[in-house]
Amino acid sequence: MLLMTYNYHGSGWEKHTGHHSPLLPHPLDPEGEQRELYILWSVKYWLNYGVPREKIIVGLATYGLGWKLVDETKTGVRAPADGGNTKGKYSEESGILSHYEICEHILKDGWKVEWIEEQKVPYAYGQGEWIGFDSPDSFYLKGITIIKEGLGGAFVWSVEMDDFNGHCGGPKYPMLRTIYEVFTQSSTSANLKFPEVKSASVQKSLSIDHSHSHSASAAASPLSAHDHSSSSSSHSSSEHSSDEQHQSHEQPQSHEVSHEESEGPEYYYEEASSIDFDCHSAGLGIHADPHSCHHFVLCTPSSDNSMGAFRMNCPAGTLYDTHLRICNHQHNVHCEHD
């Protein structure tokens, strides 16, 4: 089972910053579904529903998702934002940047890098924009977590967004190399620990030397620069203190997920003849249910060269979003049928 454990947050549906692929929750996340948007929650969710550990493959992202900041003085997690960051030179899409494009902003445009200690991931900001991304350090921690949880492995989305030309000044494919090293080391070392990474500037950044007891060593990539000794919470737009929320370096806390927290998605469908839907006019694909925001209609080809309509449920806690054409969180959807 390939878990798409990324895109938890994004400019297309949120008006505040947030890391799109955090390992752990953030203390400023509000109660409810917003506190479920992190990797370990998703893993525990499927484990609780009976998926064997060895069948779970965790998704890791080589890109970042970003926003335009409303107030350039507020640069932390959940800072007010409006719309996606400027299109990248190569990715050419607002709200997303490849690993090497982020690196270029840091090296050439002076963007600053912060480490979100509570979530074990970095973000960068500058020129009125904010981007949450993964670095070799955060990939390393995620890899160790996958091993400690006894999961099947990891997959990367996507290869071409890694630094395939060594654009950041380090080795080619730093993200793929990192996760490969973690998994190949695990076959010879049963006691992998979180690395001790010291503070460093962007110009003299530190990266993890996986071949020497995971100590910090000099490297060229600016995306490894962070200080694990302090949290980025001080940069948050909120004044709430989060000192008590800091996590240990030894191992991510195990966040148990009970069935009571979420009822689980029901992906059953029924023949749509009873809802009077014309697939010939609508065309193939997914369409809004004309009578309910809790459902959507899937039009598919049938064996007699006609089309079949199927009424399908959105997962619990979501409604069909006619703008994004997905089942989105309830608070993000205006339902005309309510």
Image (tube, grey):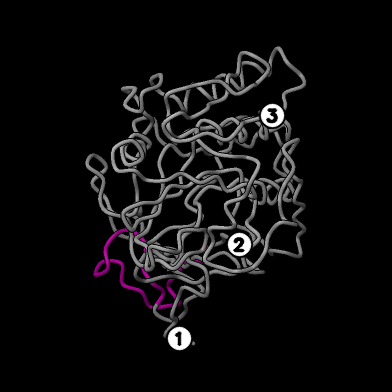
CA–CA distance in space, label 2 to label 1? 21 Å
Tag 2: amino acid: Glu
Task: Measure the C-alpha gap from mark 3 to mark 2.
Answer: 30 Å
Front position in the image: 300 or 273:
300
The image quarter containing residue 163 is top left
Mark 2, mark 1: which one is toward the viewer?
1
Q: Which amino acid does label 1 sit on?
A: His
Relative to residue 211, is residue 263 depicted above or below? below
Query: Quarter of the image containing the N terminus?
Result: top right
Magenta stretch holds residue 283:
yes
For the magenta stretch, what is the residue range?
269-289
Vertical side of 51 occupied by 272: above or below? below
Which residue is denoted by mark 1 in the rendering? 337
Residue at which label 2 appears: 266
Q: Mark 3 points at which residue?
A: 147
SS for callout 3: helix
